[in-house]
């Protein structure tokens, strides 16, 4: 059996979230994905790190069928949890911008084009980081949740003709 594609991959979801952050923050702020081995932190004073944190089922699976294509789509509503680490001297202000617009119609309209919707996010809190040189790096942390309907499409056989025969039983 060949690989079964997912309607929206984690990379596509993270690209949508990254695009939103780049859209609302001042030019020049880097936005990177966290938990990447052997990659240095960005050099700029202000930057944002996105880390996927969890997925949670919001509904049972739903099925739709396409007899012409010979396919069945299996989907479920899923919440996608993430963490944003917002670094730099402007971290507090940048956190305020992100969390305010994420919860607004502005965020909903922006994410709609990426096949996701904002559910909620917290207000953010300061979580300073001590560097290897024993100096404080300003960092704000916020957690948020997006929602989407993830689907997979699999082959499905259909009966398009019914052959009946009358049988007499004694």
Image (cartoon, grey):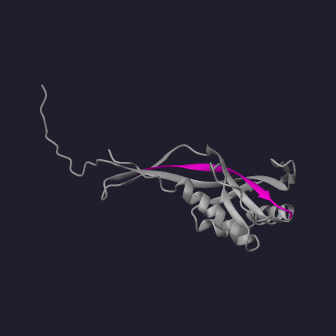
> Which quadrant holds residue 25?
bottom right
Q: Which residue is situated farthest in the bottom direction here?
A: 27
Magenta region includes residue 79: yes
Q: Is residue 81 above or below residue 108?
A: above
> Which quadrant holds residue 16?
bottom right
Horizontal side of 88 relative to 13 (left or right) equals right
Name the residue: 85% across, 65% down.
90
**Front position in the image: 139 or 64:** 139
**Front position in the image: 147 or 32:** 32
User: In this orientation, does residue 122 appear?
Assistant: no
Name the residue: 12% across, 25% down.
170
Assign the N terminus to one quadrant of the image.
Answer: top left
Q: Is residue 87 above or below residue 63?
A: below
Q: Position of residue 63 (x, y in %)?
A: 45, 49
Name the residue: 68% across, 59% down.
118
Name the chief secondary structure element in magenta. strand
Q: How many marks?
A: 0
**Front position in the image: 49 or 120:** 49
Q: Position of residue 94 (x, y in %)?
A: 81, 65
Horizontal side of 129 relative to 111 (left or right) equals right
Q: Which residues are magenta?
A: 73-89
Q: Is residue 108 above or below residue 72?
A: below
Horizontal side of 25 relative to 5 (left or right) equals right
């Amino acid at each position: 059996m060949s690989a079964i594609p997912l309607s929206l991959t984690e990379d596509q979801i993270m690209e949508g979230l990254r695009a939103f952050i780049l859209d609302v923050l001042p030019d020049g702020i880097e936005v990177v994905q966290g938990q990447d081995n052997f990659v240095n932190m960005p050099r700029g004073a202000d930057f944002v790190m996105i880390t996927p944190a969890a997925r949670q089922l919001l509904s049972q699976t739903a099925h739709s069928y396409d007899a012409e294509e010979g396919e069945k789509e299996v989907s479920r509503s899923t919440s996608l949890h993430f963490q944003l680490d917002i670094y730099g001297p402007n971290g507090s202000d940048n956190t305020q911008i992100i969390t305010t617009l994420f919860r607004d119609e502005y965020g909903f309209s922006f994410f709609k084009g990426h096949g996701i919707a904002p559910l909620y996010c917290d207000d953010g809190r300061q979580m300073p980081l001590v560097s290897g040189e024993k100096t404080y790096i300003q960092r704000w942390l916020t957690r948020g949740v997006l929602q989407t309907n993830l689907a997979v499409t699999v082959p499905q056989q259909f009966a398009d003709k019914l052959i009946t025969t009358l049988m007499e039983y004694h």
